[in-house]
Every structure is written in C-alpha cells, then in structure tokens.
Image (cartoon, rainbow, N blue to C red):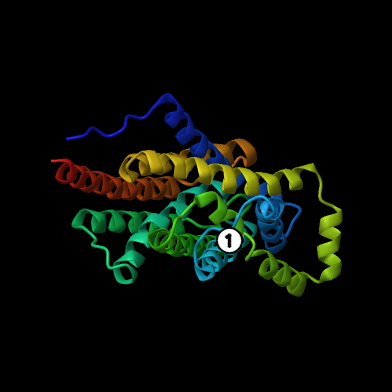
C-alpha cells in the first residue's frame, strides 16, 4: 500500500499563504467599496484579472459554455451578491464565516445535479451549520458596525453561487484537460461587460466616470489585490496543493480563513461580533469540521481499497 505524499514545508507555506490571502480578502473588499460602487468594483476586478493576460495565456481546451458559465456564475453571481452585501451592511468578519457555507451548498447541489452520495455525518454537519447561520441571522442590527439582515441574505446568496460555480468547474474538469490558471483568466472575461452595464444603468455614466477619476491608492490596491492576489495567485496555489495531495488533506485548511477574516476585520475596522454571532460562527465551523472529517475518512478508505 503506497503512503500519501507528506506535506513539505513548501506545501504548508502555500496553504497558509492561501489562508491569509483569502482571509484578508473581505477587509480589502470593504476598503475598495468605500470609494467604488459594488458593480464597478466587480468590472474592474475581473478586467484586471483577465485583460492583461489574454495575449499570453491560451484559452483552455474546453467548451466555451463551461468557461462562460463559470465566469458568469462565479464572477457576476458570487461577487455581485457579495460586493452588494458588504456595501449594504454585511461585516467583513461575518462575511468570511458565512461564505464558507459554500461547502454545504455544494454538497446539496451535487446530490441532484451530479448524483453524488451524501453520508449521514455530512447531513449532521449541514444541520449544525444551519443552526449556526440561524443564530448569526438573529443577531443582526442596523447600528454602525453591525451586520444587517439584507447584507446577510446577500452574502448567503453569494455562497450559493460559489457552490454552483464549484459544480461547473468540477464538470469542466471531467470532460477535458483542466488547467486552472488559463480557466480562471479566460472565464474572468465574461463578467466584465455585465458588471459594467449594470453599473452604467444603475449609476449613470457621469457617476461611473467620477468614481474612476477619483480612484486613489487604496481603491487601486483593492482592485489589484482582488484580481491578482485573491483570484489568480491564491487559486493557483490552492490547485497545486490539490494536484499533489488528496482533497481531504487540503480542504481543512479553508477552516482557517474565517479565523484570519475575523481578526482582520477587528484590526482594520474594529468589528466585534456579538455573542450570538460568535456562537453561530463556532457552529458553522463545527459543521464544516464534521463534514471534512467525513470526507477525510471516506478518502482514506478509498485510498486503502485502491492500494491494497
């Protein structure tokens, strides 16, 4: 029986780098939204992630419906909802927690769409996480620094769109040679025009032009961090880990993202979750842990059966 490849020091550093990049992601979004509207931020983010690389990165050898579908669902859907939710009162720290529910949405969607089995312990994890979400939602408020109900619902919708994009990416990897960097670069083309058109329609050309002209260092930093750091760099590092190690060994690192996110939101904006939000966040992370432990056990059994 072959032994699984051990995590090298480089692998550990890659995993921790992704955790930090994605954990700080929500604070950077809030920073960008202080001077840029949600739809304009989306257009700029994906323009920066795609346009500088199109002449150097060949399109992935996949049907265009998967590339376009992923770009629209993950780009326009996920980040459209998330940016709007952050703008309408979702705190950066709680957003980092709620977005992790994409794992449960993926689980639920994979059941009817991909025919994948769901084990009893995974259902338990879903139940625990749903209880945590209910606690987080019940602790909303309208005061400064508090999470609004509208922001919570929009962020939960973003997590659902992230899950749907996971299924698109998984299906794409099953039918063709899937290389993540070209896939992300070319799929990032498709949200640019919809984001820009929505921004022009809802705000008007003059307001959009004023925002572009008034962008300072913080706004440009947010755009480039989201495009090159959180999208291209982190995704590439994460995928390299998944290519070297079993998913069940890599996925639990994502549980550290909300830890970084909550700390960063407190350090940057003084956001301090309410008591019930702490309890709810703990329940969501506990549900994720239960889900991951089941996946690791199943992966271990599959490896044993394959190698014996």
Location of residue 109 in the rendering, given as x and y in whole percent from the top left corner: 36, 67
Q: Is residue 69 above or below residue 122?
A: below
> In the displayed image of the protein, which residue is found farthest to the top?
9
Q: Is residue 162 above or below residue 199?
A: above
> In the displayed image of the protein, which residue is found farthest to the bottom?
201
Image quarter of residue 195: bottom right
Q: Nearer the viewer, residue 117 or 270?
A: 117
Name the residue rendered at 50%, 51% in the picture: 180
Residue highlighted by disc 1 = 187
259 displayed left or right of 250? right
Location of residue 226 in the rendering, given as x and y in whole percent from the top left corner: 63, 48
159 displayed left or right of 45? left
Q: Is residue 85 in sight in this rendering? A: no
Name the residue rendered at 28%, 53% in the picture: 125
218 displayed left or right of 98? right
Q: Nearer the viewer, residue 112 or 100?
A: 112
SS at mark 1?
Answer: helix
Label total for image: 1
Image quarter of residue 163: bottom left
Q: Nearer the viewer, residue 29 or 52?
A: 52
Mark 1 closeness class: few <14, some 14–19, many ≥20 residues within 10 Å = many
Location of residue 36 in the rendering, given as x and y in whole percent from the top left corner: 74, 56
> In the displayed image of the protein, which residue is found farthest to the left?
308
Quadrant occupied by the C terminus: top left
Location of residue 51 in the rendering, given as x and y in whole percent from the top left corner: 70, 55
Name the residue rendered at 36%, 58% in the picture: 104
Q: Nearer the viewer, residue 145 or 61?
A: 61
Q: Is residue 15 in sight in this rendering? A: yes
């Amino acid at each position: 029986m072959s032994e699984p490849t051990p995590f090298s020091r480089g692998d550990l550093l890659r995993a921790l780098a992704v955790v930090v990049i994605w954990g700080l992601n929500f604070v950077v979004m809030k920073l960008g939204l202080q001077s840029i509207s949600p739809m304009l931020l989306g257009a700029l983010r994906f323009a920066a992630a795609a346009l500088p690389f199109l002449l150097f990165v060949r399109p992935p050898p996949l049907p265009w419906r998967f590339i376009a579908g992923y770009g629209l669902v993950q780009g326009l859907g996920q980040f459209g909802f998330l940016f709007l939710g952050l703008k309408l009162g979702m705190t950066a720290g709680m957003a980092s927690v709620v977005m992790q529910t994409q794992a449960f949405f993926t689980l639920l969607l994979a059941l009817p769409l991909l025919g994948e089995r769901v084990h009893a312990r995974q259902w338990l994890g879903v139940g625990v996480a749903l209880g945590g979400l209910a606690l987080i939602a019940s602790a909303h408020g309208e005061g400064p620094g508090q999470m609004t109900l509208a922001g919570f619902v929009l962020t939960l919708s973003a997590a659902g769109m992230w899950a749907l994009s996971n299924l698109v990416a998984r299906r794409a990897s099953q039918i063709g040679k899937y290389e993540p960097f070209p896939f992300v670069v070319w799929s990032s083309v498709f949200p640019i025009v919809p984001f820009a058109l929505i921004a022009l329609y809802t705000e008007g050309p003059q307001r959009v032009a004023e925002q572009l002209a008034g962008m300072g260092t913080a706004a440009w930093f947010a755009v480039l961090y989201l495009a090159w750091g959180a999208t291209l760099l982190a995704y590439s590092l994460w995928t390299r880990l998944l290519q070297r190690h079993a998913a069940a060994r890599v996925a639990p690192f994502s549980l550290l993202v909300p830890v970084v996110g909550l700390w960063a939101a407190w350090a940057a904006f003084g956001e301090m979750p309410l008591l019930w939000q702490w309890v709810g966040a703990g329940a969501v992370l506990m549900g994720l842990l239960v889900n991951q432990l089941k996946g690791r056990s199943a992966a271990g059994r599959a490896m044993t059966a394959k190698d014996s």
